[in-house]
Amino acid sequence: MELLYKFIGVLCLTGYISGVLGEFIPAEYTRKTIRLTVAIYIISNFFILFGNSYNLLKIQNVDSEDYSIEAENYVIESSEKELGKFIAQTLKSKKISYNRIEVHIHKQSEGLHIDSINIYGVDNTQKNMVKELLSDYGNLLFGD
């Protein structure tokens, strides 16, 4: 009930002040501007005073944690695919035959780390050249 009395008091005081200002300011456009400003002020006060007690403005928090886990998994999977494509292009440019490439990436505290690169079907005579080409990536494994 106290909130209602406050709102009525603010409404009466605002009406009185806008009436006094309207008498002293002769321009019609200025009066309309003052009325519009007062109306916006009254409506905003209404929502502020009664919004908390009656929950008129219910805004729900979005749980962003679920999306962040999915986003991390998407980034890791996309990085694995792109790195696999890059390695495949590198091997094709050097005319090295292979069957399949698997890249495994895992997340560390602040970034991604290449866990291993598995290359299947590389001829034994070309393994040394593949090791030289991909020595920057670290754990290079050959599978048959």
Image (tube, rainbow, N blue to C red):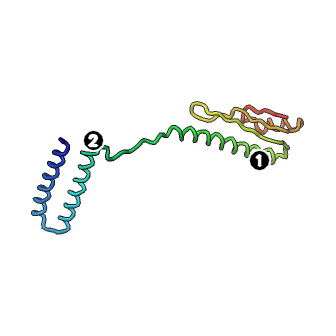
Q: Tell me which residue sits at (31%, 47%) in the image.
A: 56
Q: What residue type is labelled 2?
A: Ser
Classify mark 2: residues with Cα within 10 Å, few (<14), some (14-19) or many (20+).
few
Residue 60: image x %, image y %? 41, 43
Quarter occupied by residue 55? top left
Q: Is residue 15 above or below residue 92?
A: below
Closer-to-camera residue (96/85): 85
Q: Is residue 61 above or below residue 115?
A: below
Q: Estimate the x, y position of residue 120 in percent, counting from the top left.
A: 82, 38
Considering only order in the chain, which callout, 1 or 2, is on the residue closer to the N terminus? 2
Query: Which residue has dot 1 on it?
Result: 89
Mark 2 = which residue? 53
In-image side of 21 versus 114 (left or right): left
Disc 2 to disc 1, C-alpha distance: 64 Å
Screen quadrant of the C terminus: top right
Residue at x-position 18% and y-position 48%: 7
List x then y, in percent, for residue 54.
Answer: 29, 43
The amino acid type, in three-letter code, at marker 1 is: Gln
Q: Do the residues labelled 2 and 1 touch (CB within 8 Å)?
A: no
